[in-house]
Amino acid sequence: MPYSFRDIEKRLRKLGYKAVRQKGSHVLFSNGANTFPVPHHAGRDISPGVERQIVKLLQMSKDEFRRLV
């Protein structure tokens, strides 16, 4: 199931991440220790590969990440 940027953003906020800045079409999220970009292309979903990379950076399983609502 592809996610929109808003879906990813909600889940990251629940984990304590905040959008610290934006450069072009990528928003950088940080929790103070980890910082990483998330693409924000209007009208397009986040690809499964990018979702995998985010989940890997968060050191969570894909199911744990998907259950965050």
Image (cartoon, rainbow, N blue to C red):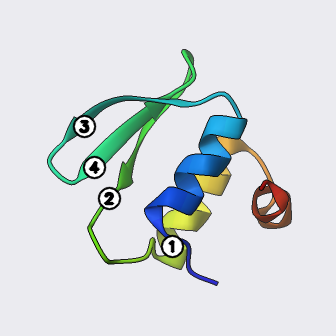
Q: Is residue 58 left or right of residue 24?
A: right
Circle 4 crowding by C-alpha within 10 Å: few under 14, some 14–19, many from 20: some
Q: Which of the two residues, 55 or 68, is positioned nearer the viewer here?
A: 68
User: How far apart are the two marked residues, 1 and 3, measured between alpha carbons?
Assistant: 21 Å
Residue annotated with mark 3:
22
User: How far apart are the two marked residues, 2 and 1, measured between alpha carbons?
Assistant: 15 Å
Tell me the residue at 53%/49% (across/down).
Answer: 9
Q: How far across and how far down the image is residue 35, in percent?
A: 46, 30
Quadrant assignment for the C terminus: bottom right
Residue 57, located in which quarter of the rendered image? top right
Badge 4 marks a residue whose secondary structure is strand
Give the vertical position of 41 relative to 24 (above or below).
below
Q: Which amino acid does label 2 sit on?
A: His
Badge 4 vs badge 2, beta-carbon distance below 8 Å: yes
Residue 63, located in which quarter of the rendered image? bottom right
Q: How far across and how far down the image is residue 12, in percent?
A: 62, 42
Q: What residue type is labelled 3?
A: Gln
Label whose residue precedes the other's in the sequence (4 or 2): 4
User: How far apart are the two marked residues, 4 and 2, measured between alpha carbons?
Assistant: 5 Å
Residue annotated with mark 4:
26
Badge 1 marks a residue whose secondary structure is helix
Tell me the residue at 55%/72% (across/down).
Answer: 3
Circle 2 crowding by C-alpha within 10 Å: few under 14, some 14–19, many from 20: some
Badge 3 marks a residue whose secondary structure is strand
Residue annotated with mark 1:
49
